[in-house]
Image (cartoon, rainbow, N blue to C red):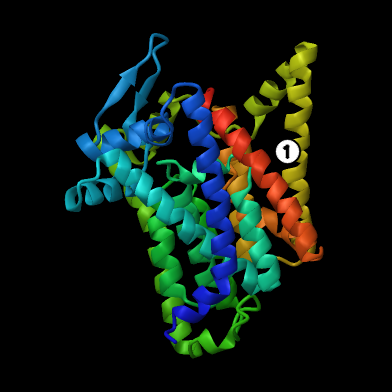
Amino acid sequence: MTDLEAPLRRAAPALLGYAAVRALGLVVLAVWSAARGKSAHTLLTARWDALWYTRVADLGYGYEVRLPNGDVHSNLAFFPLLPWLERFLHTISPLSFADGGLVVSLLASLAAAWGIFAVAEHVHGRRAAVCAVLLWAVLPVGIVQSMAYSESLFTALAAWSLYAVLTGRWLTAGTLALLAGLTRPVGLAVVAAVWVAGVTSFMAPSVTSFVRDRSTAPAPGARNWRCALGMALAPLGAAGYVLWVGHRTGKGPLGYLDVQAGWRNGFDGGAAFARFVGEKFTSFPSALAGVGLIVGVGLVLWLYVVGVRQGQPLPLLVFTGVVTALALCASSYFGSKPRLLMPAFPLLFPLALALARLRISRSAWVVGGVAVASAVYGAFWLNGTGPP
């Protein structure tokens, strides 16, 4: 048995369950779309962000749309790793750029599921890890995991980087953090996790407490230089792209913020989101949506607090905290917040632990029921306004 076969066998139930849930979602989407005279393929590959990524892959950077209100939507807002992979697949195969993005997303979603399993198993054991993967699969916006979007790719890179941190593989952690930083702006969350773990490691003379697999930890001297190199690598992806955008726009290191401002997107501490929620209470029907939003945010914060109380390792808490803060405190695209939270998979660990305590038959019924609801909601959502 090779070094890869044993971990893959342990993760097999989780990956098979994940694939089944995602297949159900795609079947429901195909049936729903056909009934409405729409193409499920088009919905998965040519909506919103997927179009922008495909355009970058095909034509490169420099495309922008000027809106009547003066806003400028530039494709410089989209980080390059997914378009690079789309272009690579298009070059070596008959796949179109859009189909290349779909293939990357499908493969990356499986890699993400495996990474989530590895992290959860390291922290809470195998049964909870299987439950964590299934819960990630049945998220209400789980259909995004099968779209030509960058969420699945980012989650895969983030999960495996965090696993590398937890097992003392600093060079791997830094390299994957670098790639995550080339995928989405929230790659900063992975960088922060690597840096906090690295600083903690330097402060402790022995192996850091969250590194449980002592057999993977190198000798102290080797660990120090590997840790330092991993920390140095981690921010290069995000920093390199942001600095390149600043150079291209001629606006210096903060040029990327100007690009985001053209999309009316920024970080305001959640003030705009709070106003958005408050406006829902101006009439009765929309007030129900306002209540739902408050409950949803409250649930996210409660799960984070529970994770702290359950002793999640510091790198996971830092990663989840940064992802959550960036998602909830962004000043625009409020409908996108559920999918922006999707990479924060450690939020699911308290629920996974609770699910793992149930009998297998009961937990199967729970996951199955939620999977059906998620598939129907995903088809309804994508056939409507879709994920912006």
Q: Quadrant of residue 271?
A: top right
Question: Which residue: 65% across, 59% down?
Answer: 132
In-front residue for pair 361/202: 361
Residue 357 pos. (x, y %): 81, 65
Secondary element at tag 1:
helix
Q: Amino acid at mark 1?
A: Val
Q: Residue furthest left?
A: 91
Q: Quadrant of residue 285?
A: top right
Q: Decide: is 4 above or below 381.
A: below
In-front residue for pair 39/310: 39
- In which quadrant is the N terminus drawn? bottom left
Q: Residue furthest top?
A: 68
- Whether residue 203 can be seen here: yes
Residue 106 pos. (x, y %): 42, 51
In-front residue for pair 376/228: 376
- Whether residue 194 can be seen here: no
The reply, left or right, for residue 40 in relation to residue 213 is left
- Circle 1 residues within 10 Å: few <14, some 14–19, many ≥20: some
Question: Which residue: 44% across, 27% down?
Answer: 261
Question: Which residue: 59% across, 72% down?
Answer: 200
Residue 337 pos. (x, y %): 59, 35
Q: How many marks?
A: 1
The reply, left or right, for residue 245 in relation to residue 58 is right
Residue 347 pos. (x, y %): 68, 53
Quickly name the residue at label 1: 297
Q: Quadrant of residue 75?
A: top left
Question: Which residue: 51% across, 24% down?
Answer: 35
The reply, left or right, for residue 343 in relation to residue 304 is left
Q: Decide: is 121 above or below 321.
A: below
